[in-house]
Amino acid sequence: MILSLVFLLAGFALLTWGADRLVEGSSSIALKLGLTPLVIGITLVAFGTSAPELVVSIRATLAGNADIAIGNVIGSNIANIALILGATALIRPLAIHRDLLKVDVPLMMIITFIAAVFILDDVIGRIEGAILFTGLVAYIAFNLKRARSLPEELIVQIVEQPDDEAATMSTLKASMWVVVGLGLLVLGAELLVKGAVDIATRLGISQAVIGITVVSIGTSLPELATSLVAALKKKSDIAVGNIIGSNVFNVLSILGITGMIHPLDSSSFGLMDMAVMLGLTIVIWPMMRRGWELNRLEGGLLLIIYFAYLTWLII
């Protein structure tokens, strides 16, 4: 059991650092090739922040652990809204841009609903995977076109930009970090899946529950840390757009790509899991619409919902 915990923790650490190095290296190369920070943010950085979840889910799928792959997506999306937005709003109320509620939140609702339908069908096959992946391509193209007319403050809120290190990095160093980052992601995913499966087996807990809880929380730790730091620096509004974008990417890229690689058996997940995931995407709309902010009371309510769901899973 101790060795399994070591594998789990080492996997989380390698995934986090590997994703960070991959994003820095690839962003630096893209800047040198003449791509704008906006394009890089919508594509490379967006993929990079979802890389831990994606690589873990692919590794779990190839190992025949579809429950961990799907549970990772469900758990990450629930944690992003209820845990991360809830905790961040509790520290400092989150200002909401009106365009987010007009476009981004409704889009997240639609995509989450489609994912819930696919999951409740007991299998996410290659056709469903292809549909979701096509949606990912369309989502990226939509954001690239839309960004030309958006105000700068909303672009900053929706899109995470490459930092100064990427702009000053040498090509050799950037290339090295891309290779190292990819390697760390693969190794981290291997250790995490191995540790999670072993712990689930030893404790008699289903892999679906492990995926929704331990794995999803672990792969969401970078987003949690970033949001909390942003809140403390009075830049908490940036967290909102990034969380919404992360949820969309999780569904379209992870379920889409893993579903195309190998059909995913989703029979371990039921109405309660889908109700919580979809319900949270719906309930935050009126919360954000009221006063155009997510306040401390609403943040506390989201945290209560999250821990109540975890308690239900464990019991």
Image (cartoon, rainbow, N blue to C red):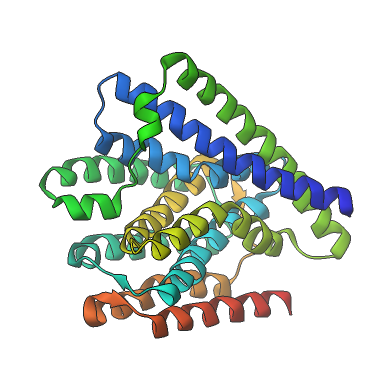
Number of residue marks: 0
Which one is in front, 291 or 173? 173
Q: In this view, does 24 lie above or below 247?
A: above
Name the residue at 36% across, 75% down. 284
Which one is in front, 130 or 208? 208
Q: In this view, does 39 lie to the left or right of 84?
A: left
Residue sticking out furthest to the left: 149
Q: In this view, does 181 lie above or below 141?
A: above
The quadrant of the image that shows the C terminus is: bottom right
The quadrant of the image that shows the N terminus is: bottom right
Residue sticking out furthest to the top: 172
Q: Residue 311, how many percent across, how many down?
A: 67, 79
Q: Is residue 92 left or right of residue 13?
A: left
Q: Is residue 142 left or right of residue 222?
A: left
* Residue 36 in view here: yes
Report which quarter residue 29 is drawn in: top left
Q: Residue 270, how many percent across, how many down?
A: 59, 70
Name the residue at 65% across, 55% down. 215
Q: Residue 235, how many percent across, how many down?
A: 33, 60
Report which quarter residue 165 is drawn in: top left
* Residue 266 in view here: no
Q: Residue 255, how many percent across, how many down?
A: 50, 48
Name the residue at 36% across, 38% down. 163
Which one is in front, 265 or 105? 105
Name the residue at 57% across, 62% down. 75
Q: Is residue 282 left or right of residue 60?
A: left
